[in-house]
Image (cartoon, helix red, strand yellow):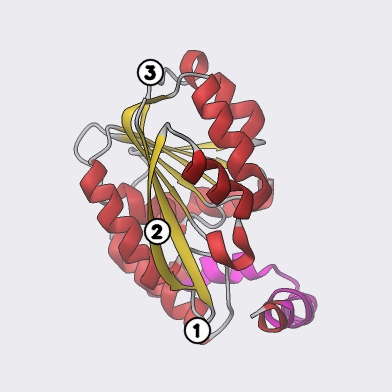
Amino acid sequence: GTAALIWNEIIREKVTNFIMNQSKEQRILNFVLQNAVRGDPRSVVDTIDKYCSQKEWAMNVGNEKGLILDKTVEEANPSVALELGTYCGYSAVRISRLLKAGARLLTVEFNPEFAAIAKQMIEFAGVQDKVKLLEGPSEEIIPQLKKKYEVDTLDFVFLDHWKDRYTPDTILLQECNLLRKGSVLLADNVIFPGAPDFLNYVRKSPHFQCTYYPSHLEYMQVEDAMEKAVFLG
């Protein structure tokens, strides 16, 4: 798995970027703009999956783990959801298409280039009324959620950013009183590349009830998994 990622993410991508004079993320967006149906979030998700499974690997949650994400969102039925790690907007589109009327998703992206791509992706999918993209580091944005973004508590949180931020950001969500009894956290990539500190933290904490969902790394046959942690108060 590591060798395949190094090949896809570093060697092949850098060569292609140089030849085409654009980033992989821009190529994904262009493919969606040319091949997906405007205003149809399902079409946008399917088109990204097609590109990333057939042309260039990318770190979206992907369709296999996406089904776990869908099921968890549907069960949580959130009014206010938070995503940490927007990347190209794949999971923001995927989550927002399942939100009930009046619900909103706040999605946080540290990389300004990714944020710019995601903004266009979200608008093309027609879900911009449900999604607010917040640009900056998660550790700065989380403490601002209550006052600046009028969040009382979060019903659902999707962790899919830097793996070493999973635990400190979960602790920060607790310290900022953003979790209520029944709030659902879902963490991606807990096996590959892995988030052992996070698994250790939520599984040993009396405040969380955990469920483990074995799966595979997006667009590959590499073992991975998602972890659901329900806040018990």
Label annotation for residue 152: 3
Vertical side of 97 occupied by 43: above or below: below
Q: Is residue 57 magenta?
A: no
Q: How many marks?
A: 3
Q: What is the x, y in percent for residue 41?
A: 31, 59
> Residue 62 appears at what percent x and percent y?
44, 69
Quick one: label 1 or label 3, which is nearer the N terminus?
3
Query: Which of the two discs, 2 and 1, sits closer to the camera?
Result: 2
Q: Foreground: 138 or 203?
A: 203
Q: Nearer the N terminus, badge 2 or badge 1?
A: 2
Alpha carbon distance from label 2 to label 1:
18 Å
Going by the numbered disc 1, the residue's amino acid type is Gln
Per the model, the C-alpha gap separating discs 3 and 2 is 28 Å
Q: Say what amino acid the circle numbered 3 marks.
A: Asp
Q: Is residue 20 magenta?
A: yes
Q: Looking at the image, is mark 3 or mark 2 earlier in the sequence? A: 3
Q: Residue furthest top?
A: 147
Question: In the depicted view, which residue is nearer to us: 30 or 70?
Answer: 70
Residue drawn at x 80%, y 77% as measured from the top left: 18
* Amino acid carrying mark 2 in the image: Tyr
Residue 81 point in image, percent of width and height: 37, 37
The residue wearing badge 2 is 212
Q: Nearer the viewer, mark 3 or mark 2?
A: 2
Which residue, given by chain and number where applicable, does mark 1 sit on? 221
Q: Residue at x 29, y 57 (%)?
A: 70
Q: Determine the residue positioned at 38% across, 71% down.
A: 63
Quadrant placement of the C terminus = top left
Using the image, determine if residue 149 lies above or below residue 111. Answer: above
Callout 2 secondary element: strand
Q: Nearer the viewer's eye, disc 1 or disc 3?
A: 1
Give neighbour class at mark 3: few <14, some 14-19, many 20+ (Cα, 10 Å): some
Identify the magenta region. Answer: 6-31
